[in-house]
Image: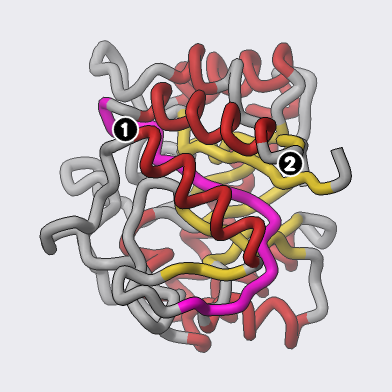
Amino acid sequence: MSQSVDLNADTGESFGPWKMGNDAALLDIVSSANIACGFHAGDPDVMAQTMALAVKNGVGIGAHPGFADLQGFGRRKLHLSHAEVAHLVQYQIGAAQAMARAAGGQVRHLKLHGALSNMASVDADLARACYTAALDVAPDIIIMVLAATAMEDVVRDLGCPYAAEIFADRAYNDDATLVDRSLPGAMIHDADYAAKRIVNMVQKGAIIAESGKHIATRIDTICLHGDTPEAVEIATAVKRELNAAQIDVAMF
């Protein structure tokens, strides 16, 4: 296959006896995993189990830091100073690095979670605070960004390695940001539709917004959310349709 793209999923989001998602099934499909670091979800045991499974399956490990908001699953906006956000990111990267090393792996990439990610996608100063903090403690880390947003502008300016991400299970606004989850149609639940839509985007090198607008962009990785009931079905369909279109799924 002449073209390849990474497929990533948010994982490690269970907590104690409470289970979120089917990480075992997802980590048998995706090529990269964004693993929660205990602030928005996850705990040390869940991190250890998820890291070990990622290493076993040859899946790239990413730190997935979010706001310290377990009850809100990191999807509620918290207005912190840039120093506070920098420390929050560094703290969680440190935890991820230690747990990955203990599992015989290493953290390859960073992806912000939930509200922190959405806020950084429209606030270049916030994105810069997060990314410079990460690079200060992990200079070789690959920064995963929402494609064609302020995040990508920042990493290009920083000159660091990055991966531009699009979403299989989320609708887009005309500015390449994600449609707010509170709005109808924000989440895509139909696996076949999601898969065909993603292949179309990858082939055209563009995000296709709900309005039909095409936003030209680099596409390195495709995300699906591990906490949705259809996550495994969507991941399977996306990988199948990509392969049918002669697009290989491989780690960036």
In percent of width and height, residue 235 lies at: 49, 30
Q: Residue at x 42, y 64 (%)?
A: 117
Disc 1 is placed on an element classified as loop
The residue mark sitting in front, 1 or 2, is 2
The N terminus - image quarter:
top right
**Is residue 205 among the parts visible in the rendering?**
yes
Which quadrant of the view contains residue 119?
bottom left
The amino acid type of the residue labelled 1 equals Asp
Instruction: Check residue 227 in the rendering and tell me which mark sits there, or answer none.
Output: 1
Q: Which residue is mark 2?
A: 247
The answer to whether 203 is drawn above or below residue 64 in the figure is: below
Magenta stretch in the rendered image: 214-229
Q: Residue at x 62, y 53 (%)?
A: 110
Crowd class of label 2 (few under 14; some 14 to 19; many from 20; radius 10 Å):
some
The answer to whether 192 is drawn above or below residue 24 in the figure is: below
Magenta region includes residue 170: no
